[in-house]
Image (tube, helix red, strand yellow):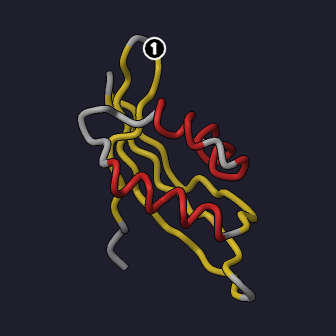
Amino acid sequence: MRSRYCAFILKNFEYLRDTHDVQTLDPGLQAANEEWAKAVEFNSLTILKTEESGTKGIVEFKVEYKEGDEIKTHHEISRFRKQSGRWYYKEGRYPKT
């Protein structure tokens, strides 16, 4: 998760594609995420919770970012899959408030 956050900061979209599970990679969504990442300034990452069970992992996190003059927060629960010792992002969802 931290490496993907760093990739967003550095605009390293190749790394983000390489660490996304090919089974759930959506090129349209990937392009939208890239455009969003280019338009914002990332301020901080806070990991709230992690779970690991075999080849499955979950990370709940918050990212604070600046969009224009506004400070915003992205709160997500992400699912990951481990293959050959490497974690791949599968999908994310917003937690219920």
x then y, percent, for residue 6: 69, 44
Residue in front for this viewpoint, 36 or 53: 36
Q: Label 1 is placed on what type of residue? A: Gly
Q: Residues within 10 Å of mark 1 (few under 14, many from 20)?
A: few
Instruction: Name the residue: 67% across, 79% down.
Output: 67
Q: Quadrant for residue 89, please give it.
A: top left
* Residue 31 drawn at (x, y percent): 44, 55
Foreground residue among 22 and 93? 22
Q: Quadrant of residue 57?
A: top left
Specify the quadrant that holds the N terminus: top right
Q: Position of residue 43 (x, y in %)?
A: 75, 65
In percent of the image, x 32 and y 74: which residue is there? Answer: 96
Q: Quadrant of the C terminus?
A: bottom left
The answer to whether residue 82 is above or below residue 11 is above
SS at badge 1: loop
Left or right side of 76 for 25: left
Residue carrying label 1: 85
Across and down, in percent, residue 79 comes to: 35, 44
Residue placed farthest to the left in the image? 23
Taking depth in this image into account, of 39 and 21 the one nearest to the observer is: 39
**Residue located at (47% from left, 20% from top):** 86
| Vertical side of 86 occupied by 4: above or below | below
- Name the residue located 66 percent from the left edge and 57 percent from the top edge: 45
Q: How many marks?
A: 1
